[in-house]
Amino acid sequence: MWTVTSGNIAAGLVVSAALALSAVPVAQADANFRLPNGKARGDGFTIVKTGERIRVSPSLAANGAGRTAWVSGNVRVNAPGIDTREAGPNNGPRGEEDMPGSNGTSTTGAAATLSVGYVVGCQVDIGALSAGIGGSIGGATILDTLGGSFTLPLAPGRIIYAQIEKKQMEKPGTYFFNWRRSQMEVQGCGGYAQARSYITVE
């Protein structure tokens, strides 16, 4: 059985929603959920998240330790007051050891960087987790930009930051990002799993 819980937070310019992923019987049909919209303001930015949806199903491996979700959503960032600065070389997400408190988000010299992704945990409570600039979690694994489909090898007690994409914000204006049916497959977690979308502007 899959269950979905949601909540919105505004910390370090983060908008997020959580979904709980229980173990799924092999013969169970897919389930579809809509998550609530979210909004966060601060430091000259406004982030608006709308249309977040998830379709969940048993893993195609049919082994009882996996589950598959297809996630979609939209983000709008209003940034009328940022500087005009071009992005430099892109070095991708980095780990907590190199960039403490960043949750793996790396800027490139642009005025700001918009990052979208999911924090996924196996048999841990990430309901109160902030994916913002100020927090970090010991033992978290940072994955590079994942695009449309990714598999998460997730052992009990582990947390993975899975970034879908990032966008450089080089001048004042309104920025849009959407993701459609990005496939997220969790393998190796035989118990309770939870995922939380996050959107950061740094």
Image (cartoon, rainbow, N blue to C red):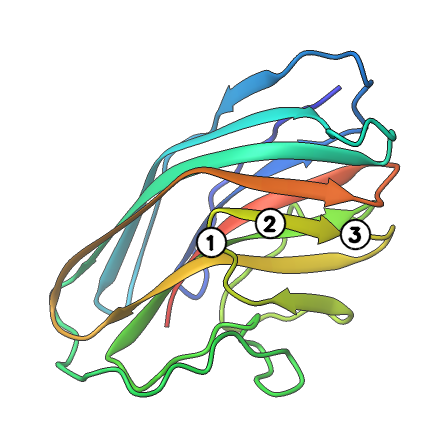
The residue that label 2 is drawn on is: 150
Q: What residue do we see at 50% from left, 65% from top?
A: 132
The local secondary structure at tag 3 comes to loop
Which-is-in-front pick, marks 1 and 3? 1
Where residue 24 sits: x, y (%)?
A: 78, 23
- Image quarter where the N terminus lies is top right
The residue that label 1 is drawn on is: 147
Q: What is the quadrant of residue 67 in the picture?
A: top right
Three-letter amino acid code at disc 1? Answer: Gly
Q: Looking at the image, is 36 positioned above or below residue 130?
A: above
Cα–Cα gap, marks 3 and 2: 12 Å
Which badge, 1 or 3, comes first in the chain's sequence?
A: 1
Do labels 3 and 2 touch, CB within 8 Å? Answer: no
Is residue 47 at least partly visible in the picture? yes
Do labels 1 and 2 touch, CB within 8 Å? Answer: yes
Image label count: 3
Where residue 191 sits: x, y (%)?
A: 87, 36
Q: Dot 2: within a 10 Å radius of its alpha carbon, few (fewer than 14), some, or many (20 or more) residues?
A: some
Cα–Cα gap, marks 1 and 2: 8 Å
Which-is-in-front pick, marks 3 and 2? 2
Where residue 183 sits: x, y (%)?
A: 55, 39
Name the residue nearer the viewer: 173 or 154: 154
Say whether residue 177 is left or right of residue 142: left
Q: What residue do we see at 49% from left, 72% from top?
A: 105
Q: What residue do we see at 47% from left, 43% from top?
A: 8
The local secondary structure at tag 2 comes to strand
The residue that label 3 is drawn on is: 154
- Image quarter where the C terminus lies is bottom left
Three-letter amino acid code at disc 3? Answer: Leu
Where residue 160 sits: x, y (%)?
A: 68, 59
Q: What residue do we see at 45% from left, 82% from top?
A: 91
